[in-house]
Amino acid sequence: MSKTKRTKKAAGSDNIESMLREDRVFKPSKEFSKQAHIGSMAQYKKLYKRSIDDPEGFWGEQAEKELTWFKPWSKVLQWKAPNAKWFVGGQTNVSVNCLDRFLDSEKANQAAIIWEGEPAAPGIPGEERTLTYRQLHREVCQFANVLKARGIKKGDVVLIYMPMVPEAAVAMLACTRIGAIHSVVFGGFSAQSVADRIQDSQAKMVLTSDGGFRRGGVVPLKENVDNALKIKVKGRFITKSIESVIVLRRTKNKVTMKKGRDFWWHEEQAKASAECKPAKLNSEHPLFILYTSGSTGKPKGILHTTAGYLLGAKLTSKYVFDLKDNDVYWCTADIGWITGHSYVVYGPLANGATTLMYEGAPNWPGPDRFWDLVEKHRVSILYTAPTAIRAFMKWGEEWPRKHDLSSLRLLGTVGEPINPEAWMWYHRVIGGSRCPIVDTWWQTETGGIMISPLPGVTPTKPGTATLPFFGVKPEVVDDNGKAVPKNSGGKLVVRQPWPSMLRGIWGDPKRFVETYWSEVKGNYFTGDGCRQDKDGYFWIVGRIDDVLNVSGHRIGTAEVESALVSHPQVAEAAVVGRPDEIKGQALVAFVTLKGSNKGNKKLLEELRQHVGKEIGPVAKPDNVRFADALPKTRSGKIMRRLLKQIAAGNVEVQGDTSTLEDANVIAQLSKDAS
Ligand code: PRX
């Protein structure tokens, strides 16, 4: 892995040609617009202008209208770049806004969460549970008391490593009830990743399960936690901050329970009172940390705080998904990602909606699992990722065709640019050519959706996230931070603060400034390349740093490289992305070995498994290529641009190779590729 700072590639260069050819426009239907929360372009434009010209006025009004407060704020925004404080002096509580707020209305008995577990085998129905707002409130209060009884106080960090079960949402909401900070770790991450996150956040407690179901198998979550808690560096446990582990019984998996440290969820819950007064939390009280990959080093703990985040999640859910009381809304993301935080849990619940939660894979027990669920629960809004849509396309139209999808009225996508073919397929086959599609651009750091059509308003074009949400001022700029002309590629920045923006990187204020606020001073730098078309629509091209987007998951190449070089036989590693029909990008690792070690199939698989163990299955390279040397500049920097071309199968490497130290390296690598 090269230690030198990597250069960013020319922004916005890759997919523009294909996108420019795309000029189909889809207008919202009159029927949709008539019933939508926002139904005309004039209304959007007026509100948008107000939100940009007078952000404090706009957000102050929204916060008053949308949230329940214990104490009103004295100032809407205190901004000294890069530090924002929203709703200064105000006090609120997220769980109150997602639950208590509805208990005096008929909504109390409406389904808050409909949950389906994964079927054990074809023909066997999955487990099913529904929690009304009242039932969810009760569970949350009880579990908040469990947290307290086990020593968790306001400001403590609780790590959540659970499958997609209602208890995961209960755990998150219980933390918010008492002002504990949750840090959810995706169940697909390894013991090592869990340990790293515990060490970085100094979490006091882990909430986990004896397992989670995935494609008929069991993911051994508790065992991973046990292994994480055993990891030592230089003779010291790196997870010594952990005082207790609470384990949900979910499978028949045998687990070992350590006396005095591990407790069963159901036993703890049974002892707890169902009354728990919510903590009155300052607007800027930390709500959660969520780790995400960057271009260098270990993942960063992105910090979100209470009031601003909640307002962002609530308002975007309401307007982008046009959420209504009678909607059954399904966001297919796992709660381990930001999409699961904002659009499975907080956004829909803050709106009093019914959110569907599903534990398993889209193709288990059959490729029509999603469509089966849509039909069964009469899902009206579906929010998923382009990578899933491309997989559905590949599996064939016959699977969705078997089901009645007429309940759907709105479709959404997130996580990566959607290729126009996938957009059209989604529109035609899933949306029956009648549902608007909202292609939503945002990030872990932004907390909520930033650029997206409003479904009753914005004419859409396949492949663009279109226009900014209220209060968001994005711009495409050059290296000097100057706006570029329409249709030119550049870097995407955000010029003004917004309520759900990240407040920092946990424990690393310096990295926060360097990563997000130094590229264009005083502006938030997204890391994405972009272009604005003649209509002002934003076309996201993809990351311009060394972060890859594999199946909508953000993976830092530096992290994978670190994992590879930690293997005893590896000398150097460089990881690049290669275009992949389903995943968007696939991971290709170029590896040189120490001494006389030779690359072979066995070692290749061993290295893949090693990365799986170090980071998690999501980061396993799709391909490992052994090389005698890596192409480097004379100053020792790995020439990733060339490796990318080789990974993509270009035997004739294009572009300037004059700074290459040893041209033979390329000749050798290209030969291997052919
Ligand atoms: O490159 C952009 C891509 O996903 C990145 C953010 O990843 P993450 O923090 O994991 O959050 C994903 C879910 C919000 C962005 O920098 N991205 C996300 N949505 C889109 C997208 N790229 C193009 N179009 C989108 N709609």
Image (cartoon, rainbow, N blue to C red):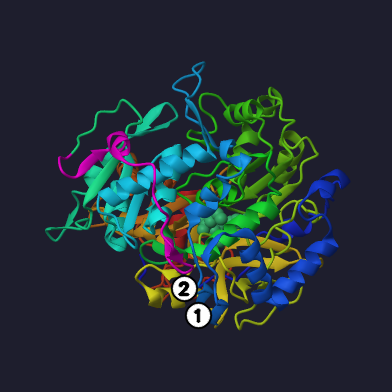
Mark 1 packing: few (<14 Cα in 10 Å), some, or many (20+)? some
- Going by the numbered disc 2, the residue's amino acid type is Thr
Q: Is residue 19 left or right of residue 589?
A: right
Question: Is the CB of the residue bearing disc 2 within 8 angstroms of ligand 1?
Answer: no
Q: Is residue 142 visible?
A: yes
Residue on which disc 2 sits: 515
Measuring 25% from the left and 28% from the top, which residue is drawn there?
Answer: 254
Q: Is residue 190 visible?
A: no
Give SS at disc 2.
helix
Measuring 54% from the left and 63% from the top, which residue is drawn there?
Answer: 69
Residue on which disc 1 sits: 518
Picture quadrant of ligand 1:
bottom right
Which of the pair 645/429 is nearer the observer? 429
Mark 2 packing: few (<14 Cα in 10 Å), some, or many (20+)? some
Measuring 45% from the left and 72% from the top, which residue is drawn there?
Answer: 6
| Span highlighted in magenta in the image | 258-287
Residue 82 on image: x %, y %: 50, 79
Question: Is the CB of the residue bearing disc 1 within 8 angstroms of ligand 1?
Answer: no
Task: Tell me, yes or no, whether the two marked residues, 1 and 2, touch with CB atoms within 8 Å.
Answer: yes
